[in-house]
Amino acid sequence: MTKAQRAATYLAKTRRACASARALLQLQDVDGADNRAYYAMFDAAYPALLMSGAPAREDLVKTHNGLISTFGEYLVKTGRVSKDMGCLLNRAQEVRK
C-alpha cells in the first residue's frame, strides 16, 4: 500500500470518527463523543506525519503516546502545525474515556 493510500484510509477513519462524535453528542453522550473526537484527531495525526515526509519510525507511531510525541516533534516543534493544535491533541488524549 502506498503512502497516499494509507493516508486515505486513515482520513476515512477520521471522517467516520467525526460523524460518530457528532451523533453521540446529539444523544448527549458526552463521554462517547469525547472518545470518538479523540480518535478522529489521532487518526488524522498519522496521515499528517506520513505525508509530511517526517522521518518517523514505524514502531513509534504504533502507540498513542508514540504517535502524539512524534507529531509534536516533527510537526508542532517545526512550526508546520500550530502549537494550539498540538495542545488540543494532547488534551484530547488526557480527557478521553
Image (cartoon, rainbow, N blue to C red):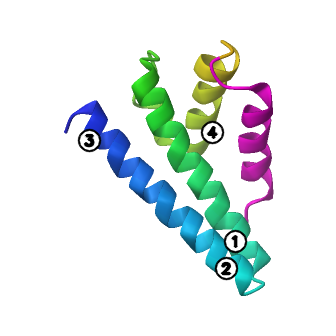
Residue receiving disc 2 = 24
Query: Which of marks 2 and 4 precedes in the sequence?
Result: 2
Q: CA distance from mark 1 to mark 4?
A: 21 Å
Q: CA distance from mark 2 to mark 3?
A: 29 Å
Count of marks, rendered view? 4
Residue receiving disc 3 = 5
Residue receiving disc 4 = 65
Q: Nearer the viewer, mark 1 or mark 4?
A: 1
Q: Which quadrant is the C terminus positioned in?
A: bottom right
Q: Is residue 68 left or right of residue 10?
A: right
Query: Which of marks 1 and 2 precedes in the sequence?
Result: 2
Residue receiving disc 1 = 33
Q: Is residue 63 left or right of residue 11?
A: right
Query: Which of marks 3 and 2 precedes in the sequence?
Result: 3
Q: Mark 4 falls on what kind of element?
A: helix
Q: CA distance from mark 1 to mark 3?
A: 27 Å
Instruction: Say which amino acid is labelled 3.
Output: Gln
Q: Are marks 2 and 1 in contact (CB under 8 Å)?
A: yes
Label 1: how many residues lie within 10 Å, few (<14), some (14-19) or many (20+)?
many
What residue span does the magenta drawing correspond to? 80-97
Label 3: how many residues lie within 10 Å, few (<14), some (14-19) or many (20+)?
few
Instruction: Say which amino acid is labelled 4.
Output: Asn
Q: Nearer the viewer, mark 3 or mark 4?
A: 3
Q: CA distance from mark 4 to mark 2?
A: 25 Å
